[in-house]
Image: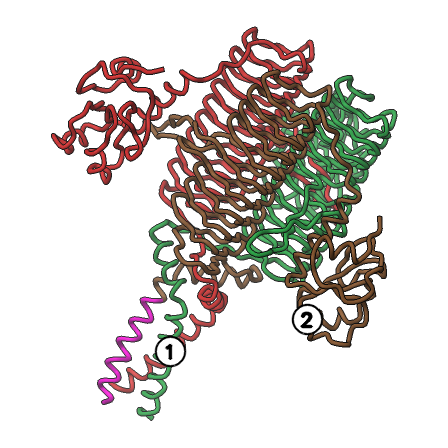
Chain colours: A green, B brown, C red
Amino acid sequence: MSTRLKNLVERLGGQLIGDETIEVIGIAPLHDATASQLTFLANSKLRAQAARTRAAALTLSPAEHEALGAEYHGARIVTDNPYAWFARAAQYFASLVAIPANPGVHPSAVVDPAAQLAADASIGPLVVIEAGAKIAAGAVIGAGCFIGRDVKIGAGTHLHSRVSFYAGCEIGARGIVHAGAVIGADGFGFAGDKGTWVKIPQTGRVVIGDDVEIGANTTIDRGAMTDTIIEDGVKLDNQIQIGHNCHIGAHTLMSGCTGVAGSAKIGKHCTFGGAAMILGHLTIADHVTISSGSLVPRSITEPGFYTGIYPLAKNAEWEKSAAIVRNLPAMREKIRELEKIIKSLSKESE
Amino acid sequence: MSTRLKNLVERLGGQLIGDETIEVIGIAPLHDATASQLTFLANSKLRAQAARTRAAALTLSPAEHEALGAEYHGARIVTDNPYAWFARAAQYFASLVAIPANPGVHPSAVVDPAAQLAADASIGPLVVIEAGAKIAAGAVIGAGCFIGRDVKIGAGTHLHSRVSFYAGCEIGARGIVHAGAVIGADGFGFAGDKGTWVKIPQTGRVVIGDDVEIGANTTIDRGAMTDTIIEDGVKLDNQIQIGHNCHIGAHTLMSGCTGVAGSAKIGKHCTFGGAAMILGHLTIADHVTISSGSLVPRSITEPGFYTGIYPLAKNAEWEKSAAIVRNLPAMREKIRELEKIIKSLSKESE
Amino acid sequence: MSTRLKNLVERLGGQLIGDETIEVIGIAPLHDATASQLTFLANSKLRAQAARTRAAALTLSPAEHEALGAEYHGARIVTDNPYAWFARAAQYFASLVAIPANPGVHPSAVVDPAAQLAADASIGPLVVIEAGAKIAAGAVIGAGCFIGRDVKIGAGTHLHSRVSFYAGCEIGARGIVHAGAVIGADGFGFAGDKGTWVKIPQTGRVVIGDDVEIGANTTIDRGAMTDTIIEDGVKLDNQIQIGHNCHIGAHTLMSGCTGVAGSAKIGKHCTFGGAAMILGHLTIADHVTISSGSLVPRSITEPGFYTGIYPLAKNAEWEKSAAIVRNLPAMREKIRELEKIIKSLSKESE
């Protein structure tokens, strides 16, 4: 399963400086790489470490190539984005050992005759596919998935085990959905009436674009009357909750345990740290970054980096500061009083 | 699938003012409704928009009916709670297009002969039902559900795909449980012993009342020695965690990602914003509202609206305010010092 | 199903003081125990209640035994850790009524011929086991589980319904994994490239030690290049998310909804309250306790109890204090101004 450097740069781009016949069997971090592995330098603080690497070759940017100079003697692959090059090389090495899914329908699957399956789609054991569903070419439906009526699964999309797609929902091409994800459960909509709750039927769908990855046990609710939309290239980590009628812009990335309440409209190229919480009926501009654990209570109209986290401290210190936080209005009042006294003292002393 | 207004008010109540033969095919928000749809006015700020709606009819309160006067010329349905009326009308329209579940047991289901199934219950493909379980009339058990020993599923309750009920748990009538929910896993109970944890068997059950809705991937743990109780009409969104021995009062509503630690006793008619976190062994009164993202560390004895969230800011501003929050005790000390000096200065100047 | 006290102390240790022929049928809390149940005193505040218990016997520490003296007349079991003794006694009583799993493979399970199953392992209905997987002696695989290629399930480990183990992951002996848990989904790793995200293949595994319990719908991601490690005796509650390449030290306990970002290294014997959030690429020492709802943004090098939670208040009061929190830098500036004025006033008055 080894590959020559020449082959890699032909596939992935980059300028090879050094012996193009060198064989590599994989990729590893700087400090770990052996003489048969590639490595990469994506952080200039690690330049000295890079100079000492035992790796077969080093992928780095033109600027680092200059800066490293003659300190490093091995083969180099120079590319504008070494980290992305590394990711693509890792994908290539992973593809060499991947076990392809079996095309066709496992005999234990329960597939409605009115579902449409591409001939080379792979339907795993104990999958249920209802009438009207369409599974496109090369899609892989893992063991125990549930695909409701009229669901559409795009070409090359891979559902891992035990994913549920409710009726009418769809996902585009080249998606990845991890185990236990639930796409299209009812949004949380009720009208209060004399102390009880009347359910508002959730008749919209979830519509997911191309190249979307959805983490394990993540849930995306269907819209109330219109659809919940996840645009192309969105990446959602595990245990994320997306409420009904949300719209998540292209290439936005959300870390684990993030929650988005209903009807939030989130821009493109946003990044959310873990367990961020976004309230509903608000708009977030493109290119916004939210820190882990922060709650977004209102619209954000400008790109930027936003945070709202109570600082961690030893519990005894927290007890003291938290008690004052509660009493901040009293403290402000005290300062105003002092200010007045000082003013009058100042006048007296004039 | 169209319906006359006359038919709707006969079913759902309300006073019809206008042409009762008008046919409508559905319901939509004010700004979206076409001439063949109903709409509703539930927020007086939208009155001007309501006056201009193209909808076939407008549902509104007596007060709004007065206020709108002759500004709006179409048919009106006057009712005390237009939003609840809208919800029920939407349910009616949804029922017209709903595909009924097939009564009977799918041949791929694995049902113990000692389970009791109502003749008209619908047991989906690849369901597992263990001995002693009882599935009542009209219940729907979705694909891939697991129903443990002696579980009781009430009349008309609908379990979507891949729901697990552990042994002995029960849910009442007309419930809805979304995909991936887990009812009755062991509560989290351990006794520490010389640095290791000894498991405390969780021998209670989960007992859920009537008209309860449970969101996708929500988990409700069984009690340690007594039961975890969810009363009638409770609505739980997705990815909620309810610890062992909790008691959730009737008609309480919890938004997504909320967590409730063990042995919390929560009142009736409470409302929890998303990702609220309630500690264990505490009591929350009826009619309490908790803001999203707030942590409830102690009992709440009075109804009201409670909040505890660090305010969001640009990260650079947050850095400054958070640094001061840590040092609030020092700031308070400084203010006290200033106060003393001012006092002595004031005396001198007397 | 009753047992003599003599039998219990022979099995579980402790010094029996009183009639060893007393028969008990179970265990209950102090206030609940009947004359045929055992109870225990683990909290000295409940000593007066213990003196009045109707229980058949009281388990307590040597110190409480002394303190209680002649106030209590019934049988006693004296042991250093009454709560752990209670837990083990409860386990014993639970074992008397437990329904053993059936050894062998349910006919509806889909097991690859190249999987290795111990003869006495129990493979439930509609389980999928792929090639190369090894299920050790006495393991129980619940209904609807998915066991990927080359997965190893240790001796006596019990997977409840609908658990997924991705290819290559493993768990040791005597583990418990609750319904819906997902072990080994891809870690969340992407390299940014011109506004899109390039997936970094996640080729490590999840390796879980012995005596680990994992809650319902909890997710543990596989490592990117090396493994995610969960050491012996770790206890994870429901809906926990563990990122790729994390290392969780032995006997650490995490309550529900906790999240741990990638590459966090957490010590042994730590305790995390519910919904704690731990950022990635940090280290937490042994014996650290984190309060519920706290975010850990940096390494913690000293054992201790840490907290960072915005204090809960009535919403109107919170509005006031939160507004000041935002303006703390201005308040500090004001205090500095006052300080200067006071200094100059003080000099004048000298």
Residue type, mark 2 in image: Glu
Residue type, mark 1 in image: Leu
Is residue B127 positioned above or below C301 on the image? above
Residue lying at 33% horizontally and 80% vertically, measured from the top left? C342
- Circle 1: element type: helix
The chain ID associated with circle 1 is: C
Is residue B342 positioned above or below B296 on the image? below
Q: Residues within 10 Å of mark 1 (few under 14, many from 20)?
A: some
- Which of C179 and C345 lies nearest the eye of the viewer? C179
Q: Do dots 1 and 2 share one subunit?
A: no
- Which of B273 and B34 lies nearest the eye of the viewer? B34
Q: Is residue B335 magenta?
A: yes
Res C182 → quadrant: top right
Q: Residues within 10 Å of mark 2 (few under 14, many from 20)?
A: some
**In the displayed structure, does residue B100 sit left or right of residue A319?**
right
**In the displayed structure, does residue A342 sit left or right of residue C253?**
left
The span shown in magenta is B332-350
Res C151 → quadrant: top right
**Picture quarter with the C terminus of chain A:** bottom left
Residue lying at 74% horizontally and 33% vertically, measured from the top left? B101
Image coordinates of residue B232 in percent, x first then y, are 53, 43
Given the current orientation, which residue lies at the most extreme top position? Answer: C119
- Identify the mark at residue B64; answer none if there is no mark: 2
Image coordinates of residue A173 in percent, x first then y, are 81, 38
Image coordinates of residue C242 in percent, x first then y, are 55, 36
Instruction: Residue under label 1, please give it.
Output: C338
The chain ID associated with circle 2 is: B
- Which of C248 and C37 lies nearest the eye of the viewer? C37
- Which of the two marks, 1 or 2, is nearer to us in this view? 2
Q: Is residue B231 magenta?
A: no
Secondary structure mostly seen in magenta is: helix
